[in-house]
Image: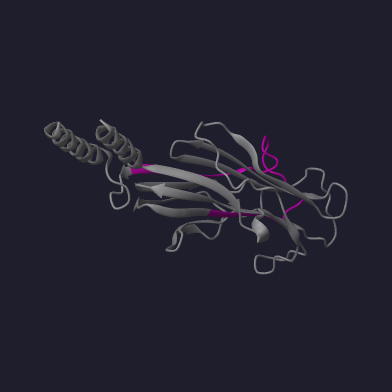
Amino acid sequence: MRVLLGFLLALVGLIDLADGASISAVLGGNRAGGFAGEAYLNYTDQSNIGSSQGQFASVPLAGPPDDNVVRTKFIDGSYNFGTAGNDGVVETTVRRQGFNFFTTTHAYFVPSSGFVGGTKPMVVNSAYWEFTINGIFDYEIKAQAPQITGNIRPYRFEKVGSGVLVQDNTGTSATTLNGTNISSGTYRLYYDHFNFSPNTSGPTGNIIGGTNLDISFTLKSEDNTVVPEPSSVAVFGLLGIGSAIAKWRRKK
């Protein structure tokens, strides 16, 4: 009987191993020290973004639960440029529903900011989704155009250790990028949301300029090179148990 029990436990373990396709995800900052926010002064253009004033913002390095609930300010922080009310702010709002990940990036200056003269501040929200994928999937990335005039929000999707799969280096227009049959591994969706227009707001109802960046995965099949297909594991497990029971009965 102990032998039978042992085989049953082994089968349970094998079935657990073969739970099937899955995606786990965390969100992390991409500036020095793992921060998401960084402030600059004396911005000129993209080739001369000015002098860094420091990194900031709290980053959870975690993923939202798969419950379709919006987590506001999942990344959150502000930097004061030295004059009361002249703050640069970064925020990222997230939501997960199954294999669909919804992101809203913010990089803005508090509405009361009154930067004047040659200050030329810039604030950037720079972070990434890291996905640990088990299975074979297609994917689609939908990026909204920046909602504050003058902002840019480039992004790229890559397999860690294997290079970039798709990217938008410009970050000024709405884009839809996709790919097929990506296999098990670790992937990252990086974004950089730059704002160097401190006295410009977003549209009515969205004056802080929240801009959407979403990625959806569609399961194609199990990746049998990594995880055995569940029904096969169960069949072979049951055959093994049947053989063990027959042997056990013959010995009685």
Q: Is residue 200 visible?
A: no
Instruction: Identify whether 170 is placed above or below 249.
Output: below
Q: Is residue 2 visible?
A: yes
Q: Position of residue 220 (x, y in %)?
A: 31, 44
Residue at image coords 40%, 42%: 22
Where are the magenta residues, as a range? 190-219
Query: Residue farthest to the left?
Result: 250
Query: Residue farthest to the front?
Result: 252
Looking at the picture, tell me which residue is in the foreground, 138 or 136: 136
Left or right side of 252 for 99: right
Residue at image coords 75%, 48%: 78
In the image, is residue 13 part of the stretch drawn in magenta? no
Q: Position of residue 252 (x, y in %)?
A: 15, 31
Looking at the picture, tell me which residue is in the foreground, 235 or 87: 235
Q: Could you tell me which quadrant the N terminus lies in?
A: top left
Looking at the picture, tell me which residue is in the foreground, 160 or 153: 160
Looking at the picture, tell me which residue is in the foreground, 204 or 29: 29
Q: How many marks?
A: 0
Q: Position of residue 138 (x, y in %)?
A: 36, 47
Query: Residue farthest to the bottom?
Result: 47
Residue at image coords 75%, 60%: 54
Q: Position of residue 117 (x, y in %)?
A: 85, 60
